[in-house]
Image (tube, rainbow, N blue to C red):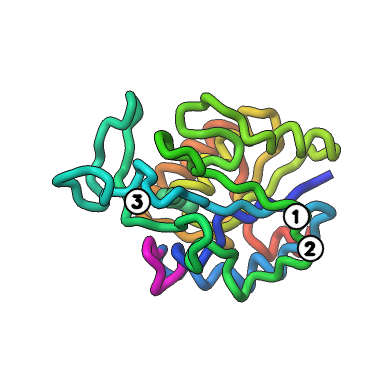
Amino acid sequence: MKALLLIDIQPDFLPGGRLAVPEGDAIIPLANALQPHFPLVVATQDWHPARHQSFASQHAGQQPFNRIDLHGLDQVLWPDHCVQGSAGAELAAGLDTSRVEVIFRKGTEVEIDSYSAFFDNGHRKSTGLADYLRGRGVRQVYVAGLAADYCVYFTAKDALQEGFETYVVEDATRPISTEGFEQAKEDLRQRGGHLVTTAQVLAG
Ligand code: VGL
Ligand code: ZN
């Protein structure tokens, strides 16, 4: 049994959004085309309280994209984004959600960021996604969405660690930093992950 994980396809990560990923909107038709090929589709939403500590606005003298130590973890400071209940935090209007069975929200704790759909960045708390997938008999996980070098990467890494056969659908994701994604891909390959294209998934 295989599952498709659609990561953070939200207006704030699309061109014009508050943390826009270049060409982020290009993945939406692919995310829609992939869905009918999976018996289980799960989506995530980045879902931050307004005063989330990953926001540069919450740290005096800091600018977006600076790095700080946040309670012992390396943290990139972001522009305010995906604030709970805001328009930018919804699932993108063009995304077909009719086959999305469940939506996992993450990043809800003020003190800690959460890139992965499985755990917060300190691996302190599980979201329950791994047990949910195992309970549904899932062995293979395909990851698409935004951003390739952050939430898609961390989700794929945790999926591997949780023992799932893990595929990143390379054309159905876009990075914040191209160089960051190159490193992420190398790391995922070394961990036993697979990179595939939408065409390969549709043909399989
Ligand atoms: C993300 C940075 C901050 C992502 C979320 O979805 O990749 N990146 N919050
Ligand atoms: Zn975030």
Q: Secondary structure at mark 3?
A: helix
Q: In the rendered image, which residue does mark 1 sit on?
A: 41
- What's under tag 1, amino acid-wise? Val
- Check if residue 83 falls in the magenta segment: no
Q: In the rendered image, which residue does mark 3 sit on?
A: 179
Q: Nearer the viewer, residue 5 or 34?
A: 5
- What's under tag 2, amino acid-wise? Arg
**Residue under the point 55% across and 44% down:** 106
- Pinpoint residue 32: horizontal percent, then vertical percent: 69, 69
Does the Cβ of the disc 3 residue fall within 8 Å of ligand 1?
A: no
**Residue under the point 83% across and 34% down:** 135
Q: Secondary structure at mark 2?
A: loop
- The quadrant the C terminus occupies is bottom right
> Does 50 appear above or below 186?
below
- Pinpoint residue 200: horizontal percent, then vertical percent: 70, 60
Find residue 141 and report its image quarter: top right
If you read the primary sequence from the N terminus, does the residue marked by circle 3 or circle 2 appear first?
A: 2
If you read the primary sequence from the N terminus, does the residue marked by circle 1 or circle 2 appear first?
A: 1
Marks counted in the figure total 3
Which stretch is magenta? 14-20
If you read the primary sequence from the N terminus, does the residue marked by circle 3 or circle 1 appear first?
A: 1
Q: In the rendered image, which residue does mark 2 sit on?
A: 99
Q: Nearer the viewer, mark 3 or mark 1?
A: 1
- Callouts 1 and 2 close, C-beta under 8 Å: yes
- The quadrant the N terminus occupies is top right
